[in-house]
Amino acid sequence: MRASPSSFAIASFSALLACARGTGDARRTDGAAIERTTSAEAAPEVHASAEAAPAPDPYLTGHAVRAKSVGHTSYALKLTLDDGSVALFKPRSKLPLGDRRYRGEIAAYRLAVALGLDNVRRALPRTFDASELRAVAEGFDDKGLVDPDGRVRGALMPWLETYRVLPLEQPAWRARWEPWVLDPLGPVPQDERVRAAAISTMLAFDYLTANWDRWSGGNVAEDGATGKVLFVDNDGAFYDPPEAAALARQLAVVRRIARFSRRFVAALRALDGPRLSSAIGDEAPGTPLLPRRVLDGVDARRRIVLGVVDGRIGDAGDAATLAFE
């Protein structure tokens, strides 16, 4: 797993995608990290006599009874919990930057929620006793990183059986979607507008999060049951500090976006610094998930994206620029 994407191509967006496909972190997780709604997140049912307590969330409380390593260049475990729930767990690891990359998954999910996006799937901070993982995960101590208290921190993400890779970086796919998003004159088929909007938002979202690893292969997916585009594998986001050359390339891509989602832009305008800090929150009570300087960087990039949007509106008009819902 690389800690820097400095070998990515610069000349054009298509070149960026083609080059990144062979040089980035080619992680795959065979089914990856996807949300499953739980009763702990729903509002508790109110009865006339009393308010029932929400049921415990098995993803936060369940014990691992089976594990399978499904990462390639990252360390990721497909866990079966004692209630039958299945999840992907990305623990702190001994791999390059593996002691912190799991936080990118959690922060990306929280940022997406704050922006009203359901394309980044649920990612929870979770700890397990190291002894519990050693008992079910063969070779855990070769890669897993254990805290002094014997616990293992990481990001836990409910599994999606209908997960499938959406190979947007491949030439045939680029030829389809680039005109929808990057060409102000490119026609957008009516039945592809939702997908086009998701791709446009993803390009801006990855610049916000400084995620250099989107285009290394297999890091975009869709729910095969619904067709929803999923921004998966976000542990290349929120580096401290982000790699400057990669950010410059991402900004060049954002400046080429011709069509944005109106709802996404409205949410981005509302997410000022204090709201952003509140949305990202803590990893554990009193322990911020991300350092202040990282949050400040996200907010600065938020303002840059809005500047790009406003410039587009000035040139092409509101309707042409905010062309997606």
Image: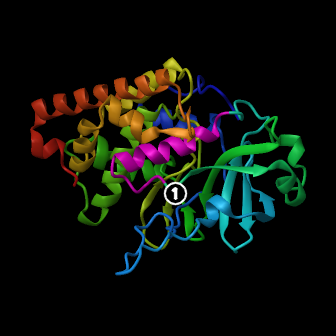
Name above or below for residue 267 compared with residue 51: above
Q: Position of residue 35 (x, y in %)?
A: 52, 62
The vertical placement of 185 against 54, above or below, is above
- Crowd band around label 1 with a 10 angstrom C-alpha radius: few (<14), some (14–19), many (20+): many
The image quadrant of residue 141 is top right
Q: Quadrant of residue 252?
A: top left
Q: Is residue 275 above or below residue 164?
A: above
Q: Which residues are magenta?
A: 100-120
Q: Which residue sits furthest bottom?
A: 48
Quadrant containing the N terminus is top right
Can I make out residue 10 in this image?
no
Q: Foreground: 312 or 34?
A: 34
The part of the image, by quadrant, that contains residue 66 is: bottom right
| Residue 273 coordinates in the image, percent (x, y) | 34, 29
Q: Amino acid at mark 1?
A: Ala
- Dominant secondary structure of the magenta stretch? helix
Viewer-side residue, 307 vs 112? 112
Report the residue marked by disc 1.
221
- Residue 203 in the magenta stretch? The answer is no
Q: Position of residue 324 (x, y in %)?
A: 22, 52
Residue lying at 58% horizontally and 47% vertically, measured from the top left: 233
- Left or right: where 314 falls relative to 222: left
